[in-house]
Image (cartoon, rainbow, N blue to C red):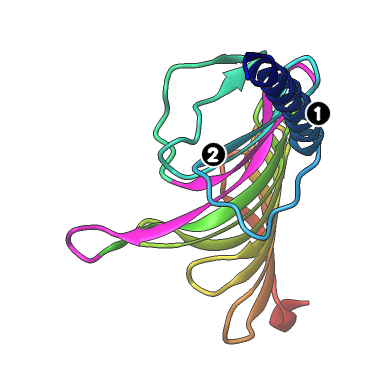
Amino acid sequence: MASFTTKSLLAMSLLVNGLVVVLFLTGFTSSRSSAFDEITVHRINVVEPDGTLRMVISNKKDLPGVIVKGKEQPPQDRPQAGMLFYNDEGSENGGLIFGGRKDSTGNVIDSGGSLSFDKYGANQIVQIAGVDDKTDQFAGMAIRDDNKRVWVGRTGDGDAMLSLMDGNGRKRIVLKVTSAGQSSLEFLDATGHVVKHVNPENI
């Protein structure tokens, strides 16, 4: 009887060890490639094999502050959720953010979205944004170098506008069509004064 028990224990031990090996191998395989119908998370970090951060998808609460070469700078007020992009060095270089809510007084705040791509070590070079809340109402695209150089979009007044700026960010040419259909072209000097105004009536 004792001999039978020893053999049984040995067989069970081998079986258990075999199952552990199988579970380990199948678990290792599934951890590298998995399929889900639905996943609910607060934040997802996408990293390179060496751990360099390349993208963050996050809710509003867990969206990180500005990260430069893997190190997060002092926290900033980022009231939106979104997706942040990072370059090969782990520094933020753009993102997609979006939000919108009412405050305690019923005013719409932080409403809209922005997709931007940054210059290396600096701010945005291209930004597509749309905002419609208590503070701002506009939609369009901005192109920058050190300052904003081109803006094309719609203003809060409903005007369609193309603005061309100089290297200091000052408007020098403005092409505009109002919501009522009135069109104009303005040339401005470095102080912002209109030096020539052209419309269909004075061409």
The residue under the point 35% across, 60% down is 101
The stretch drawn in magenta includes residue 89:
yes
Q: Amino acid at mark 1?
A: Leu
Left or right: 16 as drawn, with respect to 156: right
Q: Which mark is residue 140?
A: none
Task: Please say if 194 is above or below 19.
Answer: below
Q: Which mark is residue 43?
A: 2
Report the mark closest to the observer, 1 or 2: 1
Check disc 2 and report its element: helix, strand or loop. strand
Nearest to the observer: residue 178 or residue 186: 178
**Lower position in the chain sequence, tag 1 or tag 2:** 1
Q: Which residues are magenta?
A: 80-106
Q: Amino acid at mark 2?
A: Arg
The stretch drawn in magenta includes residue 157:
no
Q: Residues within 10 Å of mark 2 (few under 14, many from 20)?
A: some
Nearest to the observer: residue 15 or residue 197: 15
Indicate the quadrant where residue 77 lies.
top left
Left or right: 191 as drawn, with respect to 195: left
Residue beneath disc 1: 25
Indicate the quadrant where residue 201 lies.
bottom right
Which quarter of the image is occupied by the N terminus? top right
Indicate the quadrant where residue 56 lies.
top right
